Image: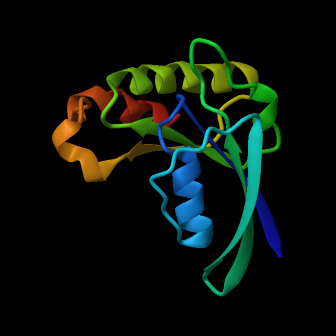
């Protein structure tokens, strides 16, 4: 059986915990829960007749008071970089986190996740804002 560590990183309150909860337990709650440190969940997925166990590390959000500890990403197969579409500042945090990961850990596969699609009318991020990620993902 294959086991892979996948980290969730991003700015404070972008919805990392909600995404993990929805994926692992199929539950969405509007109640906000701040992650302190890291919260670890497990989920199994089937692909091509093989089961892969995912160990999901939901890492606290980065803000002006707290930085994401890069050591949490050691041994990860990749990471999800979560952005709140209603907060342009969360995209800037994502750009900075991506640079920190490359500098401290190296190039890991990542997926940029634009969260809060249920609030599209309030979005501050446009397609042009994320175009630089197309080239970054290919490196």
In front of the other: 53 or 115: 115
- Res. 131 in view: no
- Name the image colouring: rainbow
Q: Quadrant of the N terminus?
A: bottom right
In front of the other: 105 or 42: 42
What residue is drawn where x is 33% and y is 24%? 88
Relative to 51, say whether 106 is above or below. Answer: above
- Res. 30 in view: yes
Q: Is residue 67 left or right of residue 99?
A: right
Looking at the image, which residue sits at the far top?
64
x%, y% of residue 114?
A: 38, 43
Looking at the image, which residue sits at the far bottom?
49
Residue 61 falls in which quadrant of the image?
Answer: top right
x%, y% of residue 6?
A: 69, 51
What residue is drawn where x is 43% and y is 36%? 83
Q: Is residue 102 left or right of residue 118?
A: right
What residue is drawn where x is 64% and y is 13%? 65
In front of the other: 101 or 43: 43
Q: Is residue 27 left or right of residue 107?
A: left
Relative to 3, say whether 94 is above or below. Answer: above
Q: Is residue 136 left or right of residue 107?
A: left
x%, y% of residue 97?
A: 58, 24
x%, y% of residue 43?
A: 70, 69
What residue is drawn where x is 39% and y is 37%? 84
């Amino acid at each position: 059986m294959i086991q892979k560590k996948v980290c969730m990183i991003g700015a404070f309150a972008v919805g990392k915990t909600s995404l993990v909860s929805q994926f692992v337990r199929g539950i969405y709650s509007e109640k906000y829960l701040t992650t302190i440190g890291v919260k670890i969940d497990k989920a199994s997925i089937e692909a091509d007749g093989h089961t892969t166990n995912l160990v999901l590390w939901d890492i606290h959000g980065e803000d002006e008071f707290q930085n994401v500890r890069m050591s949490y990403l050691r041994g990860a197969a990749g990471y999800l970089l979560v952005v709140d579409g209603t907060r342009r500042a969360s995209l800037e945090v994502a750009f900075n986190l991506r640079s920190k990961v490359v500098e401290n850990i190296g190039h890991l596969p990542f997926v940029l996740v634009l969260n809060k699609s249920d609030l599209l009318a309030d979005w501050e991020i446009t397609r042009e804002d994320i175009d630089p990620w197309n080239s970054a993902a290919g490196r």
